[in-house]
C-alpha cells in the first residue's frame, strides 16, 4: 500500500516536471539541435580533424598535426558559438537548476521525516 502511494506520487512529480516550461523549452531546443545538419557536420569535421592530428602525431608530422589541431579548434569554436548550441546550453542550465532544486527539496523532506521517526 505504501509503495503504491510512493509510486503514484513519483508519477505525479514526473508529470509536473515534464510540464514545467523550463523542461519543455529544453526538450524543444534539444530536438532542434539534434536534427540540425549543420551542427552534425561541424561535429563530424571536428572529430575528423582530431583523428587526423592523432595520425600525424603517430607518423611524426608535427606541422600537419598542428594544422589538424588548429582546424579542430576552429570547428569546436564554431560549434560552441552557434546560436542553437548557446540556447541549448542556457536551457540545459535552467532545467538542471530546476531538477537540483526539486532534488534538494525532496532530500530535505525525507530527512525531516526520518528524523521525526527516530525521535518518536
Image (spheres, rainbow, N blue to C red):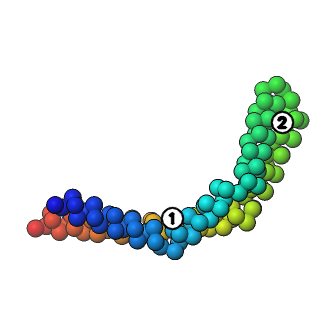
**Which numbered dot is residue 120?**
none
Q: Residue at x 34, y 68 (%)?
A: 12
Circles 1, 2 touching at the beta carbon (< 8 Å): no
Quadrant of the image containing the C terminus: bottom left
Q: Is residue 10 left or right of residue 42?
A: left
Residue lying farthest to the top in this orientation: 59
Secondary structure state at the residue bearing disc 1: helix
Q: Residues within 10 Å of mark 1 (few under 14, many from 20)?
A: some
Residue lying farthest to the bottom in this orientation: 21
The span from disc 1 to disc 2 (Cα, nearest Å) is 38 Å
Quarter of image, res 113: bottom left
Quarter of image, res 114: bottom left
- Which sits in the foreground, 23 or 77? 23
Judging by the rendered image, the residue that carries numbered circle 2 is 65
Q: Is residue 83 left or right of residue 19?
A: right
**Residue 47 against residue 106 in the figure, above or below:** above
Q: Is residue 14 left or right of residue 41?
A: left
Q: x%, y% of residue 41?
A: 76, 49
Quick check: can you spot residue 111?
A: no
**Residue 73 against residue 63 in the figure, above or below:** below
Judging by the rendered image, the residue that carries numbered circle 1 is 96
Q: x%, y% of residue 19?
A: 46, 72
Amino acid at each position: 500500500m505504501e509503495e503504491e502511494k510512493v509510486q503514484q506520487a513519483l508519477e505525479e512529480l514526473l508529470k509536473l516536471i515534464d510540464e514545467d516550461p523550463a523542461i519543455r523549452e529544453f526538450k524543444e531546443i534539444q530536438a532542434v539541435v539534434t536534427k540540425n545538419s549543420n551542427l552534425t557536420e561541424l561535429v563530424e569535421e571536428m572529430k575528423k580533424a582530431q583523428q587526423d592530428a592523432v595520425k600525424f602525431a603517430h607518423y611524426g608530422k608535427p606541422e600537419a598535426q598542428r594544422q589538424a589541431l588548429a582546424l579542430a579548434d576552429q570547428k569546436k569554436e564554431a560549434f560552441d558559438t552557434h546560436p542553437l548550441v548557446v540556447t541549448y546550453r542556457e536551457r540545459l542550465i535552467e532545467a538542471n537548476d530546476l531538477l537540483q532544486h526539486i532534488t534538494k527539496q525532496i532530500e530535505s523532506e525525507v530527512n525531516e521525516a526520518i528524523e521525526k521517526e527516530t525521535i518518536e
